[in-house]
Image (cartoon, grey):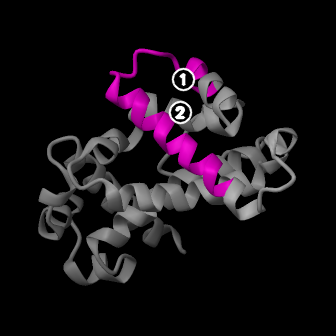
Amino acid sequence: MDRRQKRTREAIFQAFTGLLSEKSFEKITVGEILERADVGRATFYAHFETKDFLLKELCEELFCHIFDSVSKPEIQHRHIFTCEEGDSVFLHLLKHLKNNDNNILKLLVGQNNELFLQYFKKGLLRLIKSQLSLFEERKSTILPEDFWINHIASTFVETVRWWVDHGMKESPETVAEYFSLAV
């Protein structure tokens, strides 16, 4: 992607996440995103097939940021999520949620959050596969690996749901510890 395409993509993301701070995902229209991003319909559809694909790409950006921070921590990466975290990947992710970066909490607690959770879990599965050594000592030898990975991802999603439902009173560090003890 050239610089112009990256700037356009970032403008669309910024418009989308700004709208998320004002209303739920299902009430946001592509027209509102276009107006706020100041781009044409053809430009939007050149980057994203639908609003759902935009949501999917938001999740991809989050996980790409997390992956890059682990695999190349010395390099500053250009993502819509930025930070200088050196934490474990799960704590890093929890900190982004706590900070409500890019209004991601609106997606977690929204009425129709199943689509977001589907994309979120897909990213989690990739993340867990890359960090499987963290959980290896707890895995029973009779469990198939794909079951174990799915269990860890489901536990993380439910940990986040519990945290959000309880007002996120606990620190990300505490929630990361709870998660670690639960798997």
Q: Position of residue 94 (x, y in %)?
A: 53, 33
Image-quadrant location for residue 146: bottom right
Q: CA distance from mark 2 to mark 1?
A: 5 Å
Relative to 73, is 66 on the left or the right?
left
Q: Position of residue 123 (x, y in %)?
A: 57, 58
Q: Nearer the viewer, residue 43 or 57?
A: 57
Residue furthest toward the front?
A: 142
Q: Are dots 2 and 1 in contact, CB under 8 Å?
A: yes
Relative to 65, is 32 on the left or the right?
left
Q: Position of residue 17 (x, y in %)?
A: 30, 49
Relative to 61, is 67 on the left or the right?
right
Which quarter of the rendering shows the C terminus? top right
- The residue shown at (81%, 46%) is 139
Q: Does dot 2 land on a helix, a strand or a loop?
A: helix
Which residues make up the magenta segment? 149-176
Q: Earlier in the sequence, mark 2 or mark 1?
A: 2
Badge 2: how crowded within 10 Å, few (<14), some, or many (20+)?
many
Q: Can residue 64 be seen here?
A: no
Which quarter of the rendering shows the N terminus? bottom right
Q: Position of residue 122 (x, y in %)?
A: 54, 62
Above or below 157: residue 61: below
Q: Does dot 1 land on a helix, a strand or a loop?
A: helix
Q: Which residue is mark 1?
A: 172
Q: Can residue 71 be seen here?
A: yes
Q: Nearer the viewer, residue 61 or 5?
A: 61
Identity of the amino acid at label 1? Pro
Badge 1: how crowded within 10 Å, few (<14), some, or many (20+)?
many
Q: Which residue is mark 2?
A: 94
> Main structural element of the magenta stretch: helix, strand or loop?
helix
Above or below 176: residue 58: below
